[in-house]
Each structure stands twice: as C-alpha cells, then as structure tokens.
Image (cartoon, grey):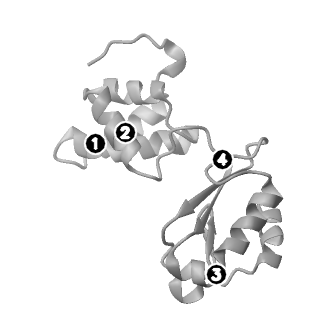
Amino acid sequence: MCKKNFGSKYQLSSQEKIEILNKKNNYENTRSSLIEALKIIQKYRGWISRESMYAISNLLKISESDVEEVATFYSQIFRQRVGRNIIRYCDSVVCYIAGYEKIKRVLETTLNVQIGNTTSDFRFTLLPVCCLGNCDKAPAIMINDDIYSNVKPEIVINLLELYQ
C-alpha cells in the first residue's frame, strides 16, 4: 500500500469511520464492504476525492488501487465535485424516440452547462443515464431521487425551480 501523507485534513471523521466499520461487519471480507464505504463518504462529502480513497484504504487495510478500481467502476460514485442537485436524463432508445433531445437542449441552455458538467454555482450537475426504468412514461428525467415522467420541454424550467 502506498504511504502518502495527505495530512489530517483528509482523515475520516469519527462518524464516517463508525459507519464504515459497522457496514464492514455485514460482509464476509473487507473488500466486499468497499462500495458501502464509498457511499458513506459520498453521503457526507458529496464526492470521492483521491485523498478520501487513501483514507478508506488505510481504514479497511486494502490497497488504494482496489479502492480506485471500485470507485471508477460505479457511475453513481462521483470522482469530482458535483452540484447539490444531480439531474439524470434518460438517453435510452425509448426516450430518444419520445423526444429526450429537446429536454436535453432545454437543460443545457437553461443551466448553461454541457452534459457531464456542473453549473458554476454548484447547484446542478447534468448527467446522462442509459435507462431510468420508466420506458412506458418516456421521456424521463431524475433529479436527485425524484423521477419525472412524460416530461415536456416547457415544464423543465418549472422542475428546475423546485430545486433552487
């Protein structure tokens, strides 16, 4: 394991450590608890920094490369700072046919941000997702944990205002 000194700034909080170690007890081996550890850190910090991965590897006594491998595999683990609100628009074939491109255009224009990026005020991050499981009500978008179905371009701005 690489021994970098990131200083106390990158240590895990007591609460983070407690939660991670409690989750670890639910798994047969430490590596199996890794995704849960990443989710806990993301819950508190909003994203997973390199320094956070190092702190997790030290706590769980697994290699930093193992932590990075899991963190980069899962699309719901954010490796860079994201907005307070995550907008996922469905870009599946069904949503494409139902007109998601108009929704995407309104989102990009209104937020003044390209896909995969975050607004300058860190209010919103715009991400594509291949399916939201709402094909019978396409097009669909998800803002944080809220799914919106049969979305029309003219209501997108109203939806965004709910998350100001």
Residue at horizontal 64 percent and vertical 81 percent from the top: 149
Percent from the top left, x then y, of residue 145? 58, 65
Closest to the observer: 61 or 111?
111
- Residue type at numbered disc 4: Asn
* Residues at circles 1 and 2 in contact by the CB criterion of under 8 Å: yes
Closest to the observer: 97 or 87?
97
Q: Tell me how far mark 4 sits from mark 2, CA to CA.
A: 29 Å
Q: Give the foreground label among 4 and 2.
A: 4
> Which comes sooner in the sequence, label 2 or label 3?
2
Q: Tell me how far mark 1 sits from mark 4, CA to CA.
A: 33 Å
What residue sits right under mark 1 in the picture?
Answer: 24
Percent from the top left, x then y, of residue 90? 57, 70
* Residues at circles 4 and 3 in contact by the CB criterion of under 8 Å: no
Q: Give the foreground label among 4 and 3.
A: 4
What residue sits right under mark 4 in the picture?
Answer: 117
Q: Is residue 15 left or right of residue 163?
A: left
Callout 1 crowding tier (Cα within 10 Å): few <14, some 14–19, many ≥20: some
